[in-house]
Each structure stands twice: as structure tokens, then as C-alpha cells.
Amino acid sequence: MNLLNLQRFIFFLFTLSLLAWLPKSEAHHSFAAEFDANKIINLNGVVTKVSWTNPHVWIYLNVKDPATGKIVNWGAELGPPHYLQRRGWRRETLKIGTPVDIEGFMSRSGKEYVNVRSVSLSVSGEILDGGSSQLEQGYNPSDNNEYVPQN
């Protein structure tokens, strides 16, 4: 292989690796871009789905709207699977049909999804943390401190 072909090959590999990396870098978001740290919401509902995928674990739950009585399915974003596992979570921690109370930060869009601050198992009262906001903001529910947004 001559020098010109080698340079073209190296350029091709570089371009290919750059293209493979770009979609992944755009897919993730910051907490502040997606959620409002000043709008904390409490949800009480029943788990309908748990999705253990990267970059975030998601819990879906049916919540009764107090104003209309209508059941609305909410999404609740947690941290990444490896982070939750280090905090004691397992795939079996939440099962479909489990009643939970979720405290989280409302989406900026106003749609039915939150970033989890804490999950409380309604039956046992056990409180689990694991929201991705805690990774960025340093929140730990076991500290029993009021959350203060970091700007």
C-alpha cells in the first residue's frame, strides 16, 4: 500500500468512527435541559412497566388525575442501570402492579414524565433513590435535607 492509499484509509477510518460517535453524543441530555428543578411533583400510582436500558432506567405508572379522575400513564426517568445497581436496585425491585409514590422533577415540556428524586414503596414505606438528577446535583434522600437546585 502506498502512502496516498494509507492516508485515504486512515481518513476513512477516522470519518467512520466520527460518524458512529455522533448519534450517541446527541442522544443524551442534561437534567436542566429536560427537567425543571423548581417544579417538584408527587405521583402516587401503580407500576405498569419497568425498562432497564441505557442511558436511563424508566418506570411507567398509572396515576389517577385528582381533577378529572382519569387514569394517566406517567414516565419516570431514573439514573443509569449501573448506578442503580450500586445503590441496591435490582431488576426485580419493582414489579408490574407494585404501588409506588414517586417524588420527582417535572418535565419542562409539561408532558407526563418526571426525573425521579425518590421512589417510595407504598406497601413497605421503603424509600429508594436513583434519579439521574442526583448524579448531577448531588442529592441524597437519606440526608433528609431539602433539595436546593444548583445553578
Image (tube, rainbow, N blue to C red):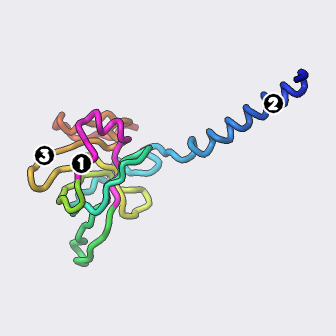
Residue 67 spot, x, y in % from top left = 23, 75
Residue 11 spot, x, y in % from top left = 79, 31
Q: Is residue 36 above or below residue 82?
A: below
Marks 3, 2: nearer the viewer: 2
Q: Answer yes or no: do the residues labelled 3 and 2 have beta carbons within 8 Å?
A: no
- Residue type at mark 2 is Phe
Between marks 3 and 2, how big is the CA–CA gap?
A: 57 Å
Residue at image location 28% in from the left, 63% down from the top: 48
Q: Is residue 124 above or below residue 86?
A: below
Mark 2 falls on what kind of element?
helix
Q: Which residue is mark 2?
A: 9
Residue 87 spot, x, y in % from top left = 25, 35
Mark 3, Cα crowd under 10 Å, few <14 / some 14-19 / many 20+, is few
- Residue type at mark 3 is Glu
Indicate which disc, 3 or 2, sits on the residue closer to the N terminus.
2
Q: Which residue is mark 3?
A: 126
